[in-house]
């Protein structure tokens, strides 16, 4: 039956080519616009650590003077609190992070020195975030303690300096020091760059910067503080900074702490631990407030409104566009079906049930949706190509994956069926006698 | 022209007429808001910076060698840059130019009393104190940026410091008026918590590196402070058409003076490029918004034309009869035009209400202002014109139906 309806639908659509083309075009454009924005939304609002993000937490305490901040603690930690919490080792895994730009060159490479972002972190960072290695491996906790001059570099820096060959054991010149490469990362592009997300609530929706690439150089935290002293970035300071970029004893927050806690009870214990730490520091007179905060990764991303407001606006706009296109299709389908009143009247008089006429009309709408879906898919590819040409941080990640490819067709067919319901219902109500009389 | 027959015909096509009305209404609501968003963004990207934008270019240089004297390096670099043919003046700043995002701001008060008030209130709001964006630079900065001094003087060589707080400053007119409303700001002493700073000059306009909202964006202060730290931004002024050549020659001159420095090619820019990069998101959004507004109007026009076409075909026989009993071609034409006008009017009426509702919704989620009411009649007019244009071809076809059709059975 379905194939027969399908055949009928094709014949009917061929009869009025202009009207069919208009409907297909409307669906295709609507689907193209909404799928482009939906793909970008999907890319930007996804879970960067599927399966483990629920166990990753970002603990915060407040070292600012009384009355300095309203609401919770600042987005990063001061050096002493961060190191205290980290050295307590109360979590299953824990990593400190601090960012800076470092001058990088490789002895023996003919590339001129470049400034590259470096992450000062600790050994747990790599297993905790499931970072893939192409060559070598992470450094050890012993290296953290020994302030070892070792480094892990990104695949792109390895390509640039060593032509993509295994560079483990080679020397990298960072600012004025030589460090030994112990690992080279594989392609790794979390979206967003979750561990560096902070300050989103002050960004006024301009948060595309959260989707940048990971750092090119990773070094043991304490070693990095020595190697690149004077270049570290602060999140903010509440007093005069006397040694910019050397922030260990400055009134600044600039260090992040990420911890992995495998169970809810572990998380509750850790919460109690940081709260008791804050009380103890207040008793010592170092803290004025005992406020603490600990969100898990997805809460933290949400708290920072990671999805840029422009992208959300584009998505709304695209769906409004799709809605208008659907209105259009409803109107045109209605016109098309009612015009065939005579034909439908004959079918009904010959014994077709209302249900059969309804099904036939819906199949016709579905065929429009399918063809529109193909057009929409092509337009989505074109739209994503345009997105990739934009100078935004997430541009290189805008590709249509298999799931979204499926969604494109599902959405196109669902939309056209939805548009087809009302006209099909009307067509199935055609009274055979009246139509036959006018023939 | 009689409305009644049109209405009674439309009663037979309630559903289609309703669909068309809704489509027009939604289009009207969305297009009004989209056009308003475009207008707001256009206003945002055309904000004046106060500097001679088409004459300024900038080069970022970093990587001072160990043990090197940063001040001596800068002086030598500036001399090399001034020797580049076409360079009219050059200055070094630590990083900030208007619209280049790296902003350093700190609180400052018109008087000590205002500071006490701010401490008491525990907030800067309402105390008279402000948080202007700070600019620093070597002597000659005002001339290099082309800033317009409206009162007082430029800095004197003795004003400059390399470390610590300077004793004088130049402020923008907006900042001066905000801190000292109704009194001359020139010569006043501002207080930053532990130093008094005298205002020696006032410039017309100087936008912040990272604008936030219109009331605060003009609050800038210039310190007579030479840049310190490993990175420095060299600012050059030249004739507009010389800028590309000057940039190339300047980079070569800097690398000749010290081949070990790092100059990131992405940070060798004319000011026009800096501005374009800052507003990149907005220009993209403007493009997208305009494209979607046009797309919506186009789709709606297609819908109107498609339905009108269908109606004309459906009513061929009755048109023929009307023609046969005396209706002229222009009667038929006007009939379809009037019908379209009625439907679009109903849509527009509903659309203006929806436009206001949508605007309120957007205001609660995005930084959008209230839709000025005059957008509504303009939007309505646009849709009326669109409706008439798209119904014209089908209506002309209807008018061309010969009376003889009445005598034939379909």
Image (tube, grey):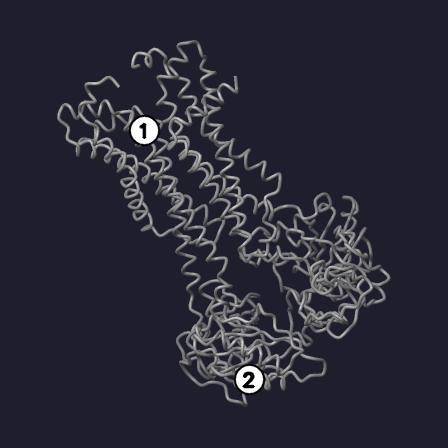
Q: B159 and B22: which one is in front?
A: B22
Q: Quadrant of the N terminus of chain B?
A: top left
How packed mark 2 is, by other alpha carbons closer than 10 Å (few <14, some 14-19, many 20 or more), is some
On residue A187, the disc is none
How packed mark 1 is, by other alpha carbons closer than 10 Å (few <14, some 14-19, many 20 or more), is some
Reply above or below: A101 against B1: below
Q: Which residue is mark 2?
A: B167
Can you give x and y, in whole percent of width and height, for residue A203 in the image? 56, 58
Q: Are marks 1 and 2 on the same chain?
A: yes
Chain letter of mark 1 equals B
Residue drawn at point x = 76 percent, y = 71 percent: A108
Q: Is residue A381 left or right of residue B303?
A: right
Q: B272 and B108: which one is in front?
A: B272
Q: Is residue A317 left or right of residue B268?
A: left
Can you give x and y, in whole percent of width and height, for residue A311 in the image? 53, 50
Please tell me in which quadrant of the rendered image residue A182 appears. bottom right
Reply above or below: B218 against A11: below
Discs 1/2, front = 1
- As helix, strand or loop, the secondary structure at mark 1 comes to helix
Q: Which residue is mark 1?
A: B310
Reply above or below: B252 against A7: below
Can you give x and y, in whole percent of width and height, for residue A317 in the image? 46, 45
- As helix, strand or loop, the secondary structure at mark 2 comes to loop
């Amino acid at each position: 039956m379905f194939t027969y309806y399908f055949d009928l639908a094709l014949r009917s659509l061929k009869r009025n080519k202009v009207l069919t083309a208009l409907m297909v075009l409307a669906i295709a454009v609507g689907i193209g616009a909404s799928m482009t924005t939906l793909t970008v939304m999907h890319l930007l609002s996804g879970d960067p650590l599927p399966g483990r993000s629920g166990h990753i937490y970002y603990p915060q305490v407040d070292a600012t003077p009384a009355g300095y901040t309203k609401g919770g603690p600042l987005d990063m930690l001061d050096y002493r609190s961060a190191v205290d919490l980290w050295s307590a080792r109360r979590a299953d895994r824990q990593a400190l992070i601090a960012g800076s730009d470092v001058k990088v060159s490789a002895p023996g490479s003919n590339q001129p020195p470049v400034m590259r972002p470096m992450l000062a972190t600790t050994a747990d960072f790599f297993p905790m975030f499931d970072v893939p290695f192409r060559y070598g491996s992470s450094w050890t906790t012993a290296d953290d303690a020994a302030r070892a001059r070792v480094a892990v570099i990104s695949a792109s820096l390895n390509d640039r300096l060593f032509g993509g060959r295994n560079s483990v054991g080679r020397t990298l010149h960072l600012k004025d020091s030589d460090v030994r490469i112990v690992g080279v990362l594989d392609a790794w592009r979390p979206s967003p760059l979750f561990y560096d997300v902070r300050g989103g609530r002050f960004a006024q929706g301009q948060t595309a910067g959260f989707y940048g690439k990971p750092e090119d150089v990773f070094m043991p935290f304490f070693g990095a503080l020595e190697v690149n002293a004077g270049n570290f970035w602060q999140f903010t300071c509440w007093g005069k900074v006397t040694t910019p970029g050397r922030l260990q004893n400055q009134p600044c927050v600039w260090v992040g702490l990420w911890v992995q806690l495998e169970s809810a009870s572990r998380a509750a214990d850790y919460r109690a631990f940081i709260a008791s730490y804050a009380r103890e520091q207040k008793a010592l007179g170092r803290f004025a407030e005992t406020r603490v905060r600990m969100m898990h990764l997805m809460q933290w991303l949400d708290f920072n409104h990671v999805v840029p407001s422009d992208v959300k606006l584009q998505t709304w706009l695209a769906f409004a566009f799709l809605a208008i296109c659907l209105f259009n299709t409803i109107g045109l389908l209605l016109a098309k079906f009612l015009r065939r009143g005579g034909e439908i009247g004959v079918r009904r008089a010959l014994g077709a049930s209302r249900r059969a006429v309804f099904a036939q009309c819906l199949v016709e709408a579905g065929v429009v949706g399918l063809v529109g879906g193909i057009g929409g898919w092509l337009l989505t590819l074109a739209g994503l190509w345009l997105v990739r040409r934009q100078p935004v941080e997430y541009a290189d990640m805008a590709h249509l994956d298999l799931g979204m490819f499926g969604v494109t067709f599902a959405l196109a067919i669902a939309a056209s069926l939805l548009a087809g319901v009302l006209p099909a219902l009307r067509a199935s109500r055609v009274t055979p006698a009246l139509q036959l009389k006018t023939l | 022209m009689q409305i009644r027959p049109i209405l009674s015909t439309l009663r037979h096509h309630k559903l289609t007429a309703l669909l068309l009305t809704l489509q027009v209404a939604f289009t009207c609501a969305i297009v009004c808001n989209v056009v308003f968003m475009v207008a707001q963004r256009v206003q945002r990207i055309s904000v004046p910076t106060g500097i001679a934008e088409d004459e300024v270019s900038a080069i970022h240089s970093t990587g001072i060698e160990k043990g090197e004297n940063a001040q001596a390096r800068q002086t030598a670099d500036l001399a090399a840059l001034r020797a580049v043919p076409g360079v009219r003046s050059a200055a070094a700043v630590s990083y900030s130019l208007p619209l280049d995002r790296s902003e350093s701001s700190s609180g400052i008060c018109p008087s000590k009393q205002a500071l006490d008030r701010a401490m008491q209130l525990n907030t800067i709001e309402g105390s008279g104190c402000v948080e202007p964006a700070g600019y620093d630079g070597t002597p000659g900065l005002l001339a290099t940026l082309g800033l317009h001094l409206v009162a007082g003087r430029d800095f004197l060589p003795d004003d400059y410091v390399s470390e610590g707080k300077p004793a004088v400053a130049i402020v923008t007119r907006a900042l001066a008026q905000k801190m000292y409303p109704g009194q001359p700001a020139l010569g006043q002493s501002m207080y930053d918590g532990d130093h008094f700073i005298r205002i020696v000059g006032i410039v017309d306009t100087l936008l912040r590196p990272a604008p936030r909202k219109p009331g605060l964006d003009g609050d800038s202060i210039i310190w007579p402070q030479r840049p310190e730290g490993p990175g420095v931004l060299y600012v050059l002024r030249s004739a507009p058409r010389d800028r590309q050549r000057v940039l190339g020659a300047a980079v070569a001159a800097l690398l000749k003076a010290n081949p070990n420095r790092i100059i990131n090619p992405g940070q060798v820019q004319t000011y026009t490029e800096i501005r374009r990069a800052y507003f990149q998101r907005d220009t993209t959004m403007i493009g997208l918004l305009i494209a979607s507004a046009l797309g919506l109007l186009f789709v709606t026009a297609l819908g109107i034309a498609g339905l009108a076409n269908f109606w004309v075909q459906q009513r061929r026989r009755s048109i023929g009869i009307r023609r046969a009993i005396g209706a002229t071609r222009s009667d038929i034409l006007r009939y379809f035009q009037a019908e379209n006008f009625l439907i679009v009017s109903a849509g527009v009426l509903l659309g203006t209400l929806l436009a206001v509702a949508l605007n309120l919704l957007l205001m609660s989620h995005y930084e959008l202002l209230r839709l000025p009411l005059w957008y509504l009649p303009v939007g309505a007019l646009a849709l009326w014109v669109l409706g008439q244009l798209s119904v014209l071809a089908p209506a002309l076809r209807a008018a061309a139906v010969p009376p003889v059709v009445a005598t034939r059975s379909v």
